[in-house]
Amino acid sequence: MTCARALVVKKTTVLVVLTLVLCLGPAVAQAQVQNPQSLYMVSVGISQYQNPGMNLQSAAKDAVDMAEAFRAQKGKLFQNVDVTTLVNQQATAANIAQAINQLRAKTNPYSYVIVYLAGHGDNTTNGEFFFNAYDFNPFQKDHTTFSWRQMQQALSGMPGKVIVILDSCRSGAVGTSDLIVLSSAMAHQNAGESAVNGYFTQALIEGLSGKADLNHNGIITLAEINLYVSERVEQLSFGKQQVATVIPPNTPNTLPLASLNGTNAAVVVNPAPQPVFQPAPPVVVNPAPVMSPQGHFQSSGPLERPRHSR
């Protein structure tokens, strides 16, 4: 399976998304938040592995930060928010599978379901993405990873709006799906991180907090997140990392992911005036890294560590 089968958000696609966000008129500008429902989320992040040689800087913090970003939507986009967070030694393969498999019993056609995974990921020789659990053993992958096949079995056909967010290397290899999938990197790429967050997670949190609200109507939509995150990740990674997105047919670009107003989600957001697009000011990023004589990247900013392991 290759990332060519995914809907990849590149700069050419960004222009199309931008047109959708800014030129659809009332369809986007009059975004509404109605029928407040519950969000059920499993947020997993592993910085410290059973094998210390696999340790990362910020994946556990990523899971906590993403959980908090969506908990903040209680009373805004969602009436209730139910989050299960698994970090480091809690995130064994068995615990991840159990938490994700329990979601189906909680949901209904109006709920949102989000599964977020941050940590090492890779592909099998057949191109299938898998996520390395805390207890990862390269000689027992079937029992120490959570595969994309397991993800689909657990979530496919589940009622409600189901979103999978992957901040791992090679995660663009998930291919087609009936799930909404936001992946941090293409099938052949590493996913970078700093001491603060993974680049992809950092961009998502920024976008959900308001920076992705291109038409200034107080609602962050799927289209706006795609546009903001794709550009921001390229900036943070110095062009070495591009996100990939799978959007099933009949999924509206105006699907809301966050509400910025402080009112209850039952209140319909007033129509916003048609926005006039103005390019955002340039984002200041750390100087591009240079290669040291020993073959390591040197930069005045945090070092990148790829999130993959075989």
Image (spheres, rainbow, N blue to C red):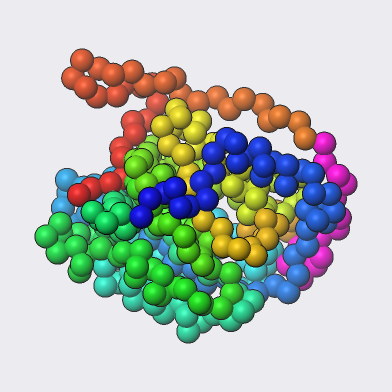
What residue sits 55% from the left and 24% below the top? 284
Asked whether, in this view, residue 202 is left or right of residue 255, the answer is: left
Q: Nearer the viewer, residue 56 or 246?
A: 246
Q: Considering only vertical position in the picture, is 209 above or below 101?
A: above
Q: Residue furthest left?
A: 139
Identify the image quadrant of the N terminus: bottom left
Mark count: 0
Q: Is residue 171 visible?
A: no
Q: Nearer the viewer, residue 251 or 202?
A: 251
What residue sits 53% from the left and 61% below the top? 180
Q: Residue furthest bottom?
A: 105
* Image spot of residue 236 (x, y percent): 47, 32
Span of residues in magenta: 263-276
* Image spot of residue 49 (x, y percent): 22, 54
What residue sits 48% from the left and 44% below the top? 243
Q: Nearer the viewer, residue 29 or 305?
A: 29
Asked whether, in this view, residue 309 is left or right of residue 289, the answer is: left
Asked whether, in this view, residue 216 is left or right of residue 232, the answer is: right
Q: Considering only vertical position in the picture, is 49 above or below 148?
A: above
